[in-house]
């Protein structure tokens, strides 16, 4: 990588773009809404059940101008979801500013394991045990989404819920490979603890990206 490209990446004016596509948001608070997804490469959180492990190595994904990403997004939707990988590994300030200047709402899905950057209309925090969110990130969360892989994840969910603001929407989501077993447990848990809601990966049920 040449110095010019590295400098642009450091400024957030280029990003390692894995893919971008227009689809229906499948999870969490905004389930069912149309949105343009921007998947950024690079992640070291290391969830063993991650369904996009090909995103982990940022070097596999071409540095792409943020302005180009904005031009593509403008053609499709007034809402963008930036995900990964782990998008906060990179500065999101420039990209989100340009999106918002074009009247596009900015949403993010992040583990929170890296420093906060960007201007967000919706901040979905999905903490992982392998690399916990930074303290500064919890207060930004509009949505807390915990993936339930085993029974111990309910305790983890409550630990994370204690750190977000009182207006944060809170979701429990079954890990896909354990959905039959875990969904039953989540239903029971939410009925006993109604501060939580259930999130399902509806895009997988609908067979869309």
Image (spheres, grey):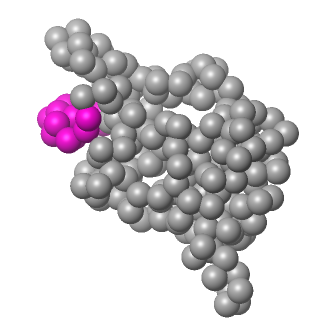
Residue 137 coordinates in the image, percent (x, y): 33, 51
The residue positioned farthest toward the front in the image shown:
101
* Above or below for 181 versus 39: above
Query: Residue 25 falls in which quadrant of the image?
Result: top right
Q: Residue at x 75, y 54 (%)?
A: 69
The residue positioned farthest toward the top in the image shown:
191
Residue 121 coordinates in the image, percent (x, y): 53, 37
Q: Residue at x 71, y 47 (%)?
A: 101
Q: Residue at x 60, y 57 (%)?
A: 40
Which stretch appears magenta?
147-165
Q: Residue at x 24, y 18 (%)?
A: 195
The one nearer the camera, 106 or 131, is 106
Residue 65 coordinates in the image, percent (x, y): 75, 66
* Above or below for 121 versus 12: above
Asked if residue 112 can be seen in this view, the reply is yes
Pick the quarter of the image with the C terminus: top right
């Amino acid at each position: 990588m040449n110095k010019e490209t590295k400098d642009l990446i450091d400024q957030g004016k280029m990003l390692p773009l894995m893919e971008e596509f227009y689809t229906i948001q499948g999870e969490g608070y905004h389930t069912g809404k149309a949105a343009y997804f921007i998947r950024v490469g690079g992640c070291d959180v290391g969830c063993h059940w991650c369904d996009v492990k090909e995103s982990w190595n940022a070097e596999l994904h071409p540095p792409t101008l943020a302005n180009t990403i904005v031009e593509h997004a403008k053609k499709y939707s007034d809402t963008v979801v930036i995900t990964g990988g782990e998008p906060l590994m990179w500065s999101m300030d420039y990209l989100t500013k340009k999106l918002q200047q074009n009247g596009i709402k900015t949403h993010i899905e992040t583990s929170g394991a890296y420093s906060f950057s960007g201007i967000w209309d919706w901040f979905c925090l999905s903490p992982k045990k392998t690399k916990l969110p930074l303290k500064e990130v919890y207060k930004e969360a509009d949505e807390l989404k915990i993936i339930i892989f085993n029974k111990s994840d309910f305790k983890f969910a409550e630990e994370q819920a204690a750190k977000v603001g009182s207006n944060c929407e809170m979701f429990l989501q079954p890990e896909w490979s354990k959905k039959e077993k875990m969904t039953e447990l989540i239903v029971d848990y939410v009925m006993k603890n109604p501060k939580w809601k259930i999130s399902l990966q509806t895009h997988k049920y609908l067979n869309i990206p």
